[in-house]
Amino acid sequence: MAKDGRSSGKGCRGTTFVEVLAALTTFMSLALVILGVERSALRGIRESDRAGEVVERTNRVADRIDREVRTAAISRLQVQGGLGLEPPVEGTDYSEMQFQRATGFTTTTVLYGNPFTLRFTMEAAEAANGTDDDADGMVDEGSIFLVDSTGMAAEIARGVTEFAMRLEGRALVVTLESRIPELGGNSRAHRVVRTIRLRNN
Ligand SMILES: [Ca+2]
Ligand SMILES: [Ca+2]
């Protein structure tokens, strides 16, 4: 009898162990599924955050350029030519331009403020060759600087992969693309084309 009891006890323990194992396996599978869903949801949130960040950052820079340039005098735009500063050619893209704001008027003349320059400078580790030389996920990237008349340069944007200023009639068309690097050698970009009507002569 005792032998039968032990044998039946062992059977019982065996069944319980298998059941526990099955339950554990089910639990682990469920936990893995939940973890996977959670991770993919988090990844989605993070990606949408980064997409929002690059859009916000690019628009903020375009707004800043708009504010700086809007009151500049169209007759005082200058670009670097072969023989020094000269007026920009309409319809031509420039990565650097000098501006002067109209600050006041007398009965006979317009008064202008000190000149300032918007300039794109490529990062030292990058060459303009269409490849990502420093392997940060951005090709030919650089910064935009606002340079005052004393030569003091303030960086107003970085991670910029496209910057052009083009005169079209009374408007300055600014094309700006900036990026945020991502894992795996990629980057997320946003591109803005802003038409800024210049108010003064
Ligand atoms: Ca790069
Ligand atoms: Ca390059």
Image (spheres, helix red, strand yellow):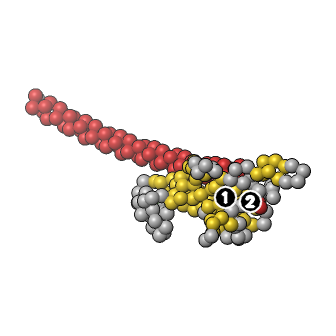
- Residue 87, image x and y in percent? 71, 66
Q: Quadrant of residue 161?
A: bottom right
| 117 or 23: nearer the viewer | 117
- The three-letter amino acid code for the residue at tag 1 is Gln
- Residue 9, image x and y in percent? 17, 32
Tally of numbered discs: 2
Residue at 72% from the left image edge and 70% from the top image edge: 90
The residue where tag 2 is placed is: 76
Element class at badge 1: strand
Residue reaching furthest to the top: 2
Residue at 41% from the left image edge and 43% from the top image edge: 35
- Residue 31, image x and y in percent? 38, 41
* Disc 1 C-beta below 8 A from ligand 2: no
Residue 95 lies left or right of residue 37; in this view the side is right
Q: How crowded is the residue under tag 2: few (<14 C-alpha within 10 Å), some, or many (20+)?
A: some
| 95 or 17: nearer the viewer | 95
The residue where tag 1 is placed is: 98
First in residue order: circle 1 vs circle 2: 2
Residue at 13% from the left image edge and 31% from the top image edge: 6
Q: What's the distance in space between the residues labelled 1 and 2, CA to CA?
A: 8 Å
Residue at 47% from the left image edge and 48% from the top image edge: 43
| 32 or 27: nearer the viewer | 32
Element class at badge 2: helix
Residue reaching furthest to the right: 107
Q: Height in image: 68 above or below 133?
A: above
Q: Height in image: 90 above or below 201?
A: below
Whether pointer 1 and pointer 2 mark residues with C-beta atoms closer than 8 Å, the reply is no
